[in-house]
Image: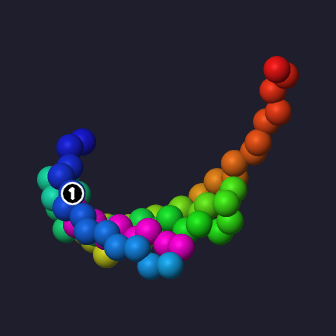
Amino acid sequence: MRCIAEGRGRLEANKEIMEWEWSGTLQGATSVGIIEKISDNKFTLTHKITLPNGNKMEEKTEMTRKKIKTEE
């Protein structure tokens, strides 16, 4: 499956927002990806997709950085 996407992004406070328009196999699909900084060690990623037939999908991921002590 090959696709080409054109995207535009912006920053709003602690959020990075990317809006995409897809062509190729996903002709007519659009998506929005939002990365939000919750704290210095926690981020969320939300991806909202509208398919060419109008169906919608959404996924959300939380990322947490864990600091690991190493022996010196």
Other residues around mark 1 within 10 Å, as few (<14) / some (14–19) / many (≥20): some
Residue 21 painted magenta: yes
Q: Quadrant of residue 6?
A: bottom left
Which residue is at the far bottom? 12
Type of the residue with mark 1: Ala
Which residue is at the far front? 72
**Quadrant where the N terminus is found in the figure:** top left
From the viewer's perspective, tell me whether residue 54 is left or right of residue 22.
right
Q: Position of residue 31 (x, y in %)?
A: 34, 67
Q: Position of residue 71 (x, y in %)?
A: 84, 22
Give the residue at mark 1: 5
Q: Secondary structure at mark 1?
A: strand
Q: Quadrant of residue 16?
A: bottom left
Point 24% across, 64% down: residue:
7
In the rendered image of this protein, does residue 1 appear above or below residue 22?
Answer: above
Point 20% across, 43% down: residue:
2
Q: Position of residue 72 (x, y in %)?
A: 82, 20
Which residue is at the far top? 72
* Start-end of magenta stretch: 14-22
Residue closest to the eye, 12 or 48 = 12
The reply to whether residue 32 is in sight is no
- Labels in figure, total: 1
Q: Position of residue 52 (x, y in %)?
A: 25, 68
